[in-house]
Image (tube, grey):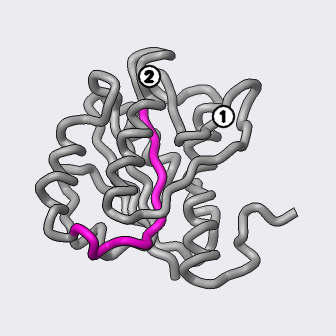
Amino acid sequence: MGKILILYDSATGNTKKMAEYVAAGAKKVSGMEIRLLHVDQAKKKDVVWCEGIAVGSPTNLGILSWKMKRFWDEEMLDLWSKIDGRIGCAFSSSGGWGGGSELTCNSILTILINYGFLVFGTPDYVGNRFTLHYGAVVAGEPRKEKEISACKKIGERLAQWVGFYIDGKKELYPLSV
């Protein structure tokens, strides 16, 4: 059974809604155990527990929130080089389009890479000219179908990669033709 952690920070509730959609996407893959946690509730044992993680943060001055950065800087520091090999992805909301959500996803992915996570984005289009290359991004609250689909897609893809790489379920390979 794959274990997936959806870890998020949310100031306005928009990133929390994204996290809930990411979790819904991960639940599309049977056999996954999902934990949905706000960063204030999370402990390092939650990251140790998971095999796949989706990290979400509101965009704060073009990068992740200070709470999320503090979690990785302080809570996780003694696990440096001890949690590598897990699979990770990112999602972010911002106040408006062009507000830095992709930069926020990149800052999250950089942190995960530094801890040894195998990270991914997807080339999938979930709407007209709407992709999630660096992770799922929205401006404000996810309301449009393409925004909700992006969140669900990144969660589903995370679960597929965990199922394929960790659980050895070849039928979950997401790129099968």
Q: Which residues are magenta?
A: 80-92
Residue at the image position 32 percent from the left and 73 percent from the top:
83
User: Dot 2, crowdedness within 10 Å: few (<14), some or many (≥20)?
Assistant: some
Query: Which disc, if any, is residue 20?
Result: none
Residue at the location (53% across, 42% down)?
Answer: 135
The amino acid pointed to by label 2 is: Gly
The residue at the point 63 percent across, 66 percent down is 160
| Residue name at image x 42 percent, y 61 percent | 53
Q: Is residue 90 magenta?
A: yes
The residue where tag 1 is placed is 131
Q: Position of residue 51 (x, y in %)?
A: 43, 73
Q: Amino acid at mark 1?
A: Thr
Residue 4 percent location from the top left of the image: 44, 67
Q: Which mark is residue 140?
A: 2
Q: Is residue 79 positioned above or below 70 on the image?
A: below
Residue 95: name its quadrant: top left
CA gap between label 2 and label 1 equals 17 Å
In this picture, residue 47 sits left or right of residue 70: right
